[in-house]
Amino acid sequence: MSQTIYDIPVKSIGGAPLTLDAYKGKVLLVVNVASKCGLTPQYEGLEKLYEGQSEKGLEVLGFPANNFLGQEPGSDEEIQQFCKLTYDVKFPLFSKISVVGVDQHPLYARLTHSLPAATGEGPMRAKLKNYGLKPNPVPDVLWNFEKFLISRDGRVVGRFAPDVTADDPRLTQAIDAELAKSA
């Protein structure tokens, strides 16, 4: 039997080894997050989304990553403290990982190859080019706060560009559609 998304080893922000098995049967929104990014205020919207939909079966899972201009330089402890004090984040955070490159975490290898293109792709890529940055090629994660929607049965069913916010109708409608399905 092949490995599922639930079998991939990850670590809690506190360093405890675990898998996503505890989230089986829930709709997951996996987000690579960063504390020193222009998109960092998205933590607020993600927390609001989590608080509003968690009783219906949504879990927002934050994976800090320092892959983009060093925008997540802190230790796991510093990241956790920042998220708590600045945005009162209650959704689960995990230990910092790499989401692109030769040291890409297996979770992100699975996510990006399962769904190579992101909804809302384009404006963020153009902004990065305007700043003189060379955007990552598809299927790689473009930047911080890219979002992957995972169905209750562990399939990647949506991918959203970094500048698609938590209250964007494209994202909220996709989440609502997945929450409406039974496990």
Image: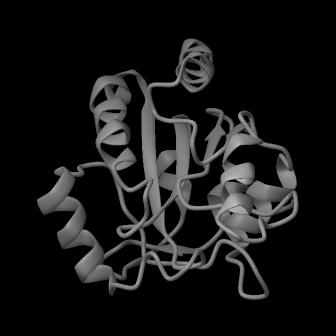
Give the image location of residue 50, x and y in percent: 34, 35
**x and y percentages locating residue 181 in the rendered image:** 62, 15
Q: Is residue 107 above or below residue 77?
A: above
Residue most extreme to the left: 85
Residue 162 location, x and y as percent?
A: 59, 48
Q: Residue at x 43, y 66 (%)?
A: 34
Q: Is residue 154 visible?
A: no
Side (left or right) of 32 relative to 124? left
Whether residue 48 sits left or right of residue 28 in the image: it is: left
- Quarter occupied by residue 13: bottom left
Which quadrant of the figure contains the C terminus? top right
Above or below for 173 versus 139 = above
In the rendered image, is residue 97 in sight? yes
* Residue at 66% across, 53% down: 127
In this view, 53 is above or below 24:
above
Color theme of the render: one colour
In the rendered view, would you say 131 is above or below 122? below
In the depicted view, which residue is nearer to us: 148 or 183?
A: 148
Residue 99's x, y, as percent?
65, 71
The residue depicted at 87 percent of the width and 64 percent of the height is: 137
